[in-house]
Amino acid sequence: MGDPKPVLRATLGQVALLAGVSLKTASRALNGERYVASATSERVKAAAKQLGFRPDAVARDFRVGARTPLVGLLMGDLANPFYARLARGAERRLYPAGLRLVSASTEESPARERELVDEMLERRIRAILVVTSTDRHPHVESEQRLGTPIVFVDRAPSDVVADTVLLDNAGGMAAAVEHLVSFGHERIGILSCGRRLSTSRERLEAFEVAMDRAGLDGMRYARDGCDDTLSAARATTELLREPIPPTALIATNNRLTIGALRALHAQGRQVAFVGFDDFDLSDVLGTSVIAHDPEAMGEAAAGFVIDRLSGADSPARRLVLPTTLVVRESSSVRHAAVNGSPRQGRNREESGRG
């Protein structure tokens, strides 16, 4: 059997022919314009329904010189639950304002990010929310001058001035280190993506500062080449095989947390652990996390867009949202316990870090 022939969508010309009217009359009837008799309008609408005709809203907007009601969201990985919640928060704020969210994944590629920004702007998108994967944004700066609102989310740009919504990365990391040190840990490791992305860079630098404040070596057990769950698992296994291994670990995002937990489970090792970003079942697994609200971040970024589209011309705004250290069983392991003492009971204390 051959491949099935594609079903072609009905055209406006076919609607006009079936209704027995001119192309212009059919267009006016479907657009609800005046000077079309009600009987003619009903006949055209009936023909459109029969044929399954849908107006081309994008083409119509181009004809009248308008932009679409679409707001773009560019993010690193559509499969990451963090981005799903971020999108949900943005959509919750945009929808009542008559705006619609469309999302695309950059796969953390600067080249792909530039390409997607260009494609969205070619389609006259109203505004763009960007979780950027690069430090250079000439493609954004030129469009800003033309009046398109660009809001950076989670990661701050270093070369353009724009509305930005961020997390208190430094405060969250400092709280985690202080917590582990209070349980007697001195050999604390960290799993990081490195310094290319601003979030990872800020968290790693905050870790170094907090360790230095405690009089500890922050780089001895640092592994900054972790890009996914597999590399995080490998790095964790390598750290555990050190002659003098760390007694505590911190992962700088949810993907690295999953990889580290898998390695810890496979090795059967009792190491104090804190992950940055909450994740599903973290409470069931008893995993301590530096938590925050991605939906609130999305809502705040969408609010900036709505303000700009409404005519706000204030200087660029920078909003830093708080993080909260949620302490559970995984980090409530005292240093003595690592060397064989009984494990401490679960602690559900929560301490905020603004």
Image: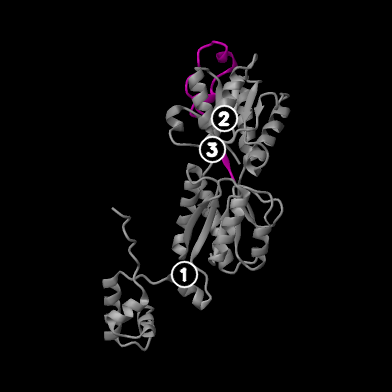
Where is residue 141 shown, x and y percent of the image? Answer: 67, 60
Does the magenta run of residues contain 10? no
Q: Pointer 3: what residue?
A: 277
Q: Secondary structure at mark 3?
A: loop
* 202 vs 136, nearest the viewer: 136
Residue at 55% from the left image edge and 33% from the top image edge:
256
**Of 36 and 9, which appears nearest the observer?**
9
Q: Is residue 20 above or below residue 255?
A: below
Q: Helix or strand or loop: what does disc 1 sit on?
A: helix
Q: Amino acid at mark 2?
A: Ala
Coordinates of residue 154 in the picture (x, y in percent): 59, 47
Q: Is disc 1 in contact with disc 2, using a CB cutoff of under 8 Å? A: no
Residue labelled with disc 1:
58
As drawn, is 290 to the left or to the right of 6?
right
Q: Residue furthest front?
A: 1
Residue at the location (63% across, 17% down)? 242
- How many neighbours does mark 3 have within 10 angstroms: few (below 14), some (14-19), or many (20 or more)? many
Magenta span: 321-348
Which badge, 3 or 2, comes first in the chain's sequence?
A: 2
Q: Which residue is mark 2?
A: 232
Instruction: Answer left or right for 335 relative to 9.
Output: right
Q: Is residue 287 visible?
A: yes
**78 relative to 194 in the view: left or right:** left
Residue 341 lies in the magenta-colored region: yes
Q: Nearer the viewer, residue 315 or 116?
A: 116
